[in-house]
C-alpha cells in the first residue's frame, strides 16, 4: 500500500516531471524548466507528496508505519506529539519545530535525540534509536525521590527556558505593553484594503471599548492581534516577509 493520493498525478509539476524523466531529460534540465535553482527543490516537492527516488525516476513510497509513529497515537508526551504532527500530510518540520517552542530544526533534533528518537529521511519522521532505547533499558540505580523530581523538572523546562531567554527582549516588550496599555506596532507592506468581518456583538463591544479607552484605532488592534497570532502559531517566517523593517 502506498501513501499516494491518485489526484496528485493531476499536478502539472508532478506529471511533467515524470514525463520528462521518461524522455531522458536530466535532473538539471528539469529543474531549469521549472525555474528552480537546483534539483533539490523538485526532489523535496515530490517527497512531500509521497514519492521516493529509485535512482531513475520517482515512484510512490510504500506506506511504512514506524513503531514510533504507531505508538505516538497513544503516548501523551511532547516527543510523541512531534511524531504525530509529522505524520500529517504535507507536514513542514520547520513549522512543527516552531509550534513546539524550538528555535530551529536542529534544536528540535537535539530534543528528540535526547528522548530516544532519530530522523528517518525516508519516512520524513522520527523513529526510535534502538541503541538509545537499549541504553535506557539497562538497570540503573535510581536517585532519591527528591533528586528525581528536581532532575525531571529541569529536563522538562530546559527547552522552554532556553526559548524564553532567546526571546527575552520581546517578552520585556510584551510585559511592558501589557502593564501600560501601549500596543506594540507592526508596519505591514502594501497598500490599505477594506475587509468586512462579521464579529459577535460582544466581541465588537470589547473592540470599541478598548479602542476608546487606549486611543488606538480598531485597525491597529486587529493588525496587532493578527501579528501576535501568526507569531504564536508557527507563521513567524511568513510574517517577517510582509513586515517593513
Image (cartoon, helix red, strand yellow):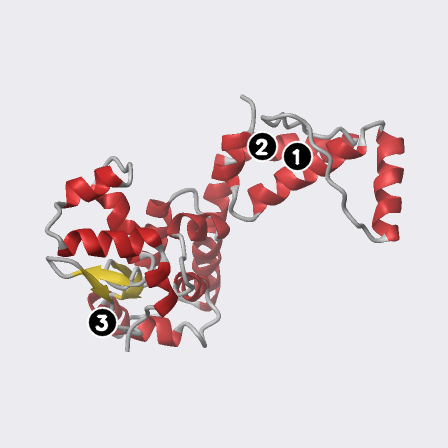
Look at mark 3 in the image and give the residue it sits on: 134
- Horizontal and vertical percent for residue 121? 24, 58
Say which of marks 3 and 1 sits in front.
1
- Horizontal and vertical percent for residue 71? 38, 76
Say which of marks 2 and 3 sits in front.
2
For the point 23% across and 44% down, the residue is 40
For the point 87% across and 52% down, the residue is 202
Q: Which mark is residue 174?
A: 1
- Horizontal and vertical percent for residue 110? 32, 51
Q: Spatial distance from mark 3 to mark 1, Cα to Cα?
A: 45 Å
- Vertical order, 169 against 101 (above or below): above
Q: Is residue 72 left or right of residue 187?
A: left
- Horizontal and vertical percent for residue 170? 58, 32
Report the front residue among 21 and 64.
21
N-terminal-most mark, 3 or 1: 3
| Label 2 Cα crowd, 10 Å radius (few <14 / some 14-19 / many 20+) | few
| Label 3 Cα crowd, 10 Å radius (few <14 / some 14-19 / many 20+) | few
For the point 39% across and 43% down, the residue is 104
Amino acid at each position: 500500500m502506498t501513501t499516494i493520493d491518485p489526484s496528485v498525478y493531476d499536478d502539472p509539476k508532478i506529471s511533467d516531471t515524470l514525463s520528462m524523466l521518461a524522455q531522458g531529460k536530466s535532473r538539471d534540465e528539469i529543474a531549469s524548466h521549472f525555474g528552480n535553482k537546483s534539483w533539490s527543490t523538485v526532489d523535496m516537492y515530490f517527497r512531500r507528496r509521497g514519492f521516493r527516488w529509485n535512482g531513475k525516476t520517482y515512484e510512490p513510497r510504500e506506506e511504512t508505519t514506524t513503531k514510533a509513529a504507531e505508538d505516538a497515537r497513544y503516548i501523551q508526551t511532547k516527543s510523541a506529539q512531534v511524531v504525530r504532527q509529522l505524520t500529517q500530510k504535507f507536514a513542514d518540520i520547520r513549522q512543527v519545530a516552531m509550534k513546539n517552542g524550538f528555535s530551529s530544526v536542529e534544536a528540535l533534533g537535539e530534543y528528540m535525540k535526547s528522548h530516544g528518537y532519530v530522523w528517518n529521511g525516508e519516512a520524513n519522521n522520527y523513529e526510535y534509536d534502538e541503541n538509545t532505547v537499549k541504553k535506557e533499558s539497562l538497570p540503573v540505580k535510581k536517585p532519591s525521590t527528591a533528586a528525581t523530581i528536581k532532575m525531571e523538572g529541569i529536563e522538562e523546562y530546559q527547552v522552554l527556558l532556553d526559548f524564553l531567554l532567546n526571546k527575552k527582549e520581546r517578552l520585556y516588550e510584551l510585559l511592558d505593553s501589557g502593564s501600560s496599555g501601549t500596543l506594540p506596532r507592526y508596519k505591514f507592506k502594501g497598500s490599505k484594503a477594506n475587509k468586512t468581518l462579521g464579529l459577535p456583538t460582544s466581541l465588537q463591544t470589547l473592540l470599541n471599548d478598548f479602542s476608546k479607552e487606549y486611543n488606538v484605532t480598531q485597525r491597529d488592534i486587529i493588525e496587532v492581534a493578527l501579528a501576535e497570532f501568526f507569531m504564536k502559531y508557527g507563521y513567524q517566517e511568513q510574517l517577517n516577509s510582509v513586515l517593513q523593517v
